[in-house]
Image: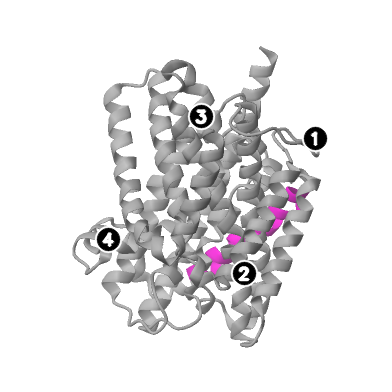
Amino acid sequence: MDAINDQQSFHQRVKAAGVLIAAGIVFGDIGTSPLYTYNAIFHSGEVIVPEKALGVLSCVIWTLTLQTTIKYVLITLQADNKGEGGIFSLFALIKRYYGKWLIVMAIIGGSFLVADGIITPPISVASAVEGMLAIYPNLPTVPIVIAIIIALFLIQQFGTQQIGRFFGPVMLVWFTFIGVIGLLAVSKEPGVLRAINPIYAFDLLVHYPKGFWLLGGVFLCTTGAEAMYSDMGHVGRNNIRVSWIYIKISLILCYAGQTAWLINSGKANDLSPFYNIVPQAIYLPSVILATLATIIASQALISGCFTLANEAIHLGFWPRHRIIFPGTVRGQIYIPFFNWALMAACIGMVLYFKESKNMEAAFGLSVTLTMLTTTGLVALWLRTRRKPLIIVASVTIVFLSVEFSFLIANLQKIKEGGWIMLVVGGLISGIMLI
């Protein structure tokens, strides 16, 4: 009983330090998506059509609202198993009601989230470091990205408590920064804010030529949502919810600012739309800040992968490995085998793709499959909580419709590099099932 009360207290309390650490540990991935999301949608030399720009912004706003805010922050975070989150915790909560046939769904979801953790550090760090090319066109970015990734995995053994104390303040500065530069850009084209109206998203998907297929790029704005659920045990549910209010506002302002710049310029260039809205006077510090933020972005997925691996081992899905509990904060774990395996895989991705624009094809497809399995498991969990069938069915249909749309749009990425994530996810799933 005391353990249950401690768990409830942990998730209910909201403290400034908890909110700050949540910003550092949980939101790094989704918080750096403005660096590369628009790169996957607007290509260098493309003449900007306002209908497309406003439609994409509307899709981003409503994706962050439906997928991240409603599905994960409001609904899925309720499903904690003794304080822990993640798809395997969700499976453990409902398996006694529905039997072990759910094992396949849980394993597929967990496996593809780990696969996503292999591509997130390379694309995040590379997208930030490549901002230096505007100043140093011949800068060799690949060795720099690899060095940063190695350093990131080396510090994992010290635990998220120490890391979070540093990452939290940095991410607070980052979210404030992207919100402010977005607001400055929006002030030059305030009309972009009308994209809050979902009719612009509808027109893009239905009437704009090949507009539906742009969802493959739009999806990149929410890829960190699943890691948010996995990291719940590290920082607490309500700390995540309170942090998200400020973070979502900053993200929307940043995307709106990039949209304003695209419409004003009339043409995309070689530089990311994000870096085009950065004032030249602070360009170099912004690249440094972006690089720090992308290191933190990688932390969200790494922490989530450790949590998933720990749960998989305890459920008997994965061979046993040495597990270390660094620090004194609950929910923090470190698994040496997974740490070094993930590092090697990330380095392999950098060497194979070399540039962030090449990684975009592999990014997103795997986490779409994870989100679909999470939706199915959440629907079953809601039924165990005796929620009305009509409400459960309605919510599930909405989320499945959105996620299947993203999946179909992402399938076009298979030939461009998405096949790698399918192979990795399939391999991990095979090991767990065997």
Q: From mark 3 to mark 4, how far is it between C-alphas?
A: 32 Å
The range drawn in magenta is 162-183
Q: Give the foreground label among 1 and 2.
A: 2
From the viewer's perspective, tell me whether residue 4 is left or right of residue 375: right
> Sequence order check: which comes first, mark 2 or mark 3?
3
Q: Which residue is mark 1?
A: 328
Look at label 3 and name its amino acid: Leu
> Sequence order check: which comes first, mark 4 or mark 2?
4
Measuring 42% from the left and 31% from the top, which residue is drawn there?
378
| Residue 246 visible in the picture | no
Q: Position of residue 253 (x, y in %)?
A: 47, 63
Instruction: Label 4, secondary structure: give it.
Output: helix
Look at label 2 and name its amino acid: Leu
Locate the C terminus and report the quarter of the image it occupies. Answer: top right
- Which of the colour schemes (rainbow, by chain, secondary structure, one colour) is used? one colour
> Sequence order check: which comes first, mark 4 or mark 1?
4
Instruction: Label 1, secondary structure: give it.
Output: loop
Q: Which residue is mark 3?
A: 90
| Residue 358 visible in the picture | yes
Observer-nearest residue: 72 or 321?
321
Q: Quadrant of residue 428?
A: top right
Q: Does 58 sit above or below residue 228? A: below
Q: From mark 1 to mark 2, how far is it between C-alphas?
A: 37 Å
Magenta region's main secondary structure? helix
Q: Which residue is mark 4?
A: 212
- Report if residue 40 lies within the magenta region: no
Q: Position of residue 271 (x, y in %)?
A: 51, 80
Q: Residues within 10 Å of mark 2 (few under 14, many from 20)?
A: some
